[in-house]
Amino acid sequence: MKLTIKIIFATLLIPAFVFAQQSAGKGQSTGKKQLKPISNDLFGVFFEDLSYSADGGLYAELIQNRSFEYSPGDNKKWQPLSFWEYTTAGFGYGTISVESAQPIASVNPHYIVLNIDDPGKEGVGITNAGFDGIYLRAGENYNLSVYVRQISSAPIPVKVELRGAKGVSYGQFSFKTQGSGWKKYTGIIKATQNADSAKLTLLALAKCKIAIDEVSLFSEHTFKNEKNGMRADLAQAVADLKPKFMRFPGGCLVHGDGLNNIYRWKNTIGPVEFRQQQRNIWNYHQSFGLGFFEYFRFCEDIGAKPVPVVAAAVSCQNSGGTRGTGQKGLPMTEMKSYIQDILDLIEYANGPATSKWGAKRAAAGHPKPFHLQYIGIGNEDKQTYDFRNRFKMISNEVRAKHPEITIIGTVGPFPSGEDFELGWAFADKLSVPVVDEHFYQKPAWFLDNNARYDDYRRTKSKVYIGEYASWGNSLLNALAEAAFMTGLERNGDIVAMASYAPMLANLSHTSWNPNLIYFNNKTVVPTANYYVQQLFSVNQGDLYVPGVIRFKQDNAVKDSTLAASCVKDSKTGDIILKIIMDERCQLYMK
Ligand code: AHR
């Protein structure tokens, strides 16, 4: 099968009847034709910390395991010193230990102690190799910060250096400790050379006892130069999609691998050293440096509406690798406080800076609200009594206290089947405003399902296709998705939102394929699927114009290999045609 896609911007070559319809206004009929409104929020993005897309990805922190909290619980091979080396190059000696008796914050208990008998010629310390090396650009400033507690009595000279192979220096920063108690030391290191795989070494240069924690390094050029911000090139690739919304923080990550692994947004805000980190369901670690404040701020920076998803107070049904029987519900005794957390999230996003949670947002540097409009409850959850009961409790409370917030429910992981049917029936019963459908399927499925929403009842919940992708990154996959997306525009009155998934994957740590954007430390690689998403997003329009594009076919060609749409952008007056066509078909415009 050979397909081509054309995007045509047509403001002049429009058949006369289209103009006639336009002048009749939104949603009105002229003769047989009717312009249909398309959801303002149709094409957005889905972000999940999967395949190192947060730590080691979008989050611009260059130090891996900066706070010594990696553990075998994250990954059986890991412990607090993973990705660190004990450094004694100049014949110095002493001991290194991981301790937890006097941490900066009890939620972040581990730190290291160097007890140095002799610093030798070069000092004794620790070295971090970042996420597969630290990528440096010559002339760029790197913001360093580290917490140090001087345990011995005299001030301790400390050197922090970016190094290449054989210890060659790419820039350094030195300071002297100033008394006991945890203190944060900050400095700038200007890189003297380009390097793909530098390391950061921190050395104490005297006989001493010193505690170290939270070693952090960011390029000063994060996206929009935000503090604790995003990697600029990767964030720009997301911004260039011009998404109408961003769903976060997942996916399966939200409902977690067991009850103790449910994503708790409150653990992800405030100063980073006070955030309670946890295992990532995809078998690594979440530093939560990229937390809910940073998600909201990023959405604002790229002009996307924030769509946070919270667990429906149940864990993933596949918890513990159970393939469907691992769903557990939070005890009823915890539901009140769990629901309060969700109400607090709404206050955190939208409440005045004088409110309890709005004040925390303001303290983080954002007194103005984030204009939260949607909240997702649950992700692909198995439709059990435990799930439904808890979903209903949450939904009732959110609706009662915040009728202005649109709730997005969930109808399982597949486009049909038991959870899908039960999920829809449940959503009908509760009049859930929007439900989240997911499909990962072959390209042929997307072609065959172009008309999926044509016959959906207009009186039921609207649809958010929260995760979809055809299995692959070839041009054919991208075109099959494009064909499907014309059907979303045609049904943009009931398909409220759609987001391809997953969005980002680190090439060295990819635990799911396909993805929209691949990257390593140096390079960002958008896929063919990415360009389809972008073409649709920037050419979305707000009105669907039916009946403009027709195909003349011989009988051998199936309808499913064809798709087209015609939309109007009322602001610009543009009429936009999207055509995905099989070369055997003849197109004519009526
Ligand atoms: O997008 C990857 C995963 O697919 C998501 O975490 C989950 O919701 C879905 O099953």
Image: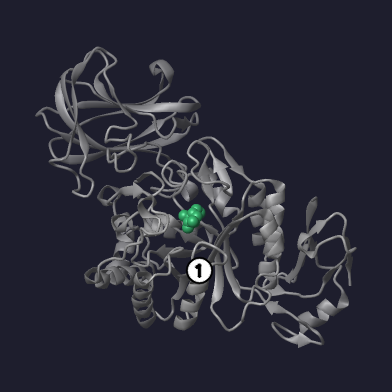
**Furthest residue to the left?**
153
- Residue 372, relative to residue 473: is it above or below? below
The number of callouts visible is 1
Question: Which residue shows up at 49% across the image and 65% down it?
Answer: 412
* Side (left or right) of 589 relative to 154: right
In the image, 314 versus 382, the foreground residue is 382
Residue 373 showing in the rendered view: no
- Ligand 1 within 8 Å of disc 1? The answer is no
Quadrant in which residue 83 is drawn: top left
Residue 127 picture location, percent across and down: 32, 26
- Residue 448, relative to residue 514: is it above or below? below
**Which residue is under mark 1?**
418
* Side (left or right) of 219 relative to 448: left
Question: Which residue shows up at 32% across the image and 62% down it?
Answer: 328
In the image, 526 versus 438, the foreground residue is 438
Q: What type is the residue that disc 1 sits on?
A: Glu
* Side (left or right) of 326 relative to 356: right
Q: In which quarter of the image is the C terminus?
A: bottom right
Residue 440 picture location, percent across and down: 58, 56
* Side (left or right) of 302 relative to 199: right
Residue 430 showing in the rendered view: yes
Label 1 sits on a secondary structure element that is helix
Question: Which residue shows up at 50% across the image and 68% down it?
Answer: 418
In the image, 411 versus 175, the foreground residue is 411
